[in-house]
């Protein structure tokens, strides 16, 4: 049995089991009926990031509108469109202003069971934590993408089954499994691939550990594995996040990030709204240079980054960071400043 | 090896479905649930209308893989909480 057949079988079993478990579903429907009826919402963020390094300046405005269109309490159509420009000044010469745009996701979610949601359409590929949870700029502690992010910076076109369940007091199991079809359309590009992510989450400890797997089945076949950890201890105002990825074609790498909330240092607005973050990351390039993914460093690289974010008021954030790139013949500083505005309307 | 892997994956993916809603499990606290789930990734959100909030929480239920219980608890927390105030309140909340 190959991976595709395995995943299709899992999807069928998950669907059959959800139908068989009628009583919990009925109980959930009763609970949901007590909440307000959802209405369409338009949300998203606008951000403007500027990056400076020796011999190069980059200005990157980006607009990411999100549409949430519920149909009753069980169905949700959601979509995010991405528009961005990367203006680069190399040695006094600005590059042409080309607007890159594409559909990040356009998916229909059906909450079949309290522990199962089925998704069809175009969705963010569930691999690791950065793509699904941390890619919106208004969430990030450090604006720059991790070095290994291009490995899983993609969307899939196909079907996905996902959900979570409380296994016992203080222990949740979450899962996501999917299959994606090959699409060559510029706006809807995706690989033929299959994979999934599973994690154990301890809500009271605010600790989650997850594993991811993907098998890319397009023109070049290769495998990817990943692991991730998030921990926000209650005793100290620090959020820890870490992720590693290893692939057979694209190399391997990790990032580790700690973010300290300064609101415990004083009552002044500066402390209440500031956050300091430190990220350490490394990428090891493959022995044979890869051409499958753009954006990855072409050589093994190490990069520590120190960042600061300040929430001007709810919805607007200012960020600044300083990083150092360590790589053969590529040792240089990287400065980034930016502003993000998050909105929601209807 | 493949069969063992398949069986393992099936066990992982089937376990949430078989977990169901055990009435013996203690109900989750809305305040704790909001802090344990939402605020480990992002800052406090603005106050929206109850119907907008229902949509946003539905979106987050799928995106953040939250359980049905947690979703209901967060809806309850957001319905009862005061609107987030600009600058005057802690942007990152109390840990």
Image (cartoon, grey):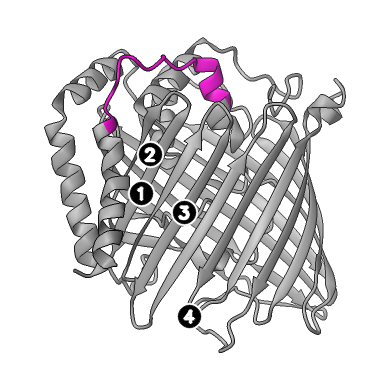
Tell me if mark 3 has few (under 14), some (14-19) or many (20+) residues whose alpha carbon lies within 10 angstroms of its own. many
Task: Return the chain for callout 3.
Answer: A
Q: Are marks 2 and 3 in contact (CB under 8 Å)?
A: no
Task: Return the chain for callout 2.
Answer: B
Q: CA distance from mark 1 to mark 4?
A: 25 Å
Q: Secondary structure at mark 3?
A: strand
Q: Which residue is mark 3?
A: A211
Q: Which residue is mark 4?
A: A292
| Callouts 3 and 1 on one subunit | yes
Q: Which residue is mark 1?
A: A176
Front in this rendered view, residue A206 or A328: A206
Q: Secondary structure at mark 4?
A: loop
For the C terminus of chain A, the quadrant is top left
The image position of residue A317, as x and y in percent, is 71, 40
Q: CA distance from mark 2 to mark 4?
A: 30 Å
Q: Which residue is mark 2?
A: B62
Q: Is residue A104 magenta?
A: no
């Amino acid at each position: 049995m190959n991976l595709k057949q395995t995943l299709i079988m899992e999807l069928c079993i998950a669907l059959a089991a959800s139908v068989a478990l009628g009583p919990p579903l009925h109980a959930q429907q009763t609970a949901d009926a007590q909440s307000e009826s959802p209405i369409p919402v338009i949300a998203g963020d606008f951000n403007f990031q500027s990056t400076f390094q020796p011999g190069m300046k980059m200005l990157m405005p980006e607009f990411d509108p999100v549409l949430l269109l519920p149909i009753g309490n069980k169905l949700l159509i959601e979509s995010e469109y991405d528009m961005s420009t990367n203006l680069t000044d190399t040695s006094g010469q600005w590059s042409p202003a080309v607007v890159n745009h594409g559909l990040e996701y356009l998916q229909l979610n059906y909450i079949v069971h309290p522990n199962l949601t089925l998704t069809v359409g175009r969705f963010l590929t569930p691999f690791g934590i950065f793509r699904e949870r941390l890619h919106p700029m208004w969430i990030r502690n450090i604006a720059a993408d991790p070095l290994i992010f291009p490995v899983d910076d993609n969307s899939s076109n196909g079907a996905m089954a996902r959900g979570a369940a409380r296994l016992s007091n203080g222990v949740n199991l979450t899962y996501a499994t999917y299959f994606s079809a090959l699409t060559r359309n510029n706006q809807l590009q995706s690989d033929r691939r299959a994979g999934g992510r599973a994690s154990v989450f301890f809500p009271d400890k605010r600790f989650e550990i997850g594993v991811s797997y993907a098998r890319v089945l397009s023109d070049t076949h290769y495998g990817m594995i990943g692991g991730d950890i998030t921990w926000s201890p209650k005793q100290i105002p620090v959020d820890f996040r870490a992720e590693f990825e290893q692939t057979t074609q694209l190399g391997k790498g990790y990032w580790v990030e700690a973010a300290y909330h300064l609101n415990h240092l004083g009552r002044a607005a500066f402390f209440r709204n500031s956050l300091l973050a430190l990220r350490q990351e490394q990428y090891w390039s493959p022995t044979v240079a890869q051409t499958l993914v753009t954006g990855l460093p072409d050589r093994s690289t190490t990069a520590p980054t120190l960042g600061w974010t300040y929430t001007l008021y709810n919805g607007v954030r200012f960020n600044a960071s300083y990083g150092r790139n360590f790589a053969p013949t590529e040792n240089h500083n990287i400065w980034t400043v930016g502003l993000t505005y998050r909105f929601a309307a209807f | 090896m493949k069969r063992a892997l398949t069986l393992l994956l099936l066990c992982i993916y089937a376990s949430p479905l078989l977990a169901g809603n055990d009435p013996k499990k203690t109900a989750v606290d809305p305040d704790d649930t909001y802090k344990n789930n939402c605020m480990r990734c992002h800052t406090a959100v603005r106050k929206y209308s109850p119907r907008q909030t229902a949509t946003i929480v539905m979106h987050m239920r799928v995106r953040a893989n939250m359980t049905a219980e947690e979703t209901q608890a967060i809806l309850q927390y957001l319905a009862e909480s005061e609107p987030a105030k600009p600058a005057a309140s802690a942007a990152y909340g109390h840990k």
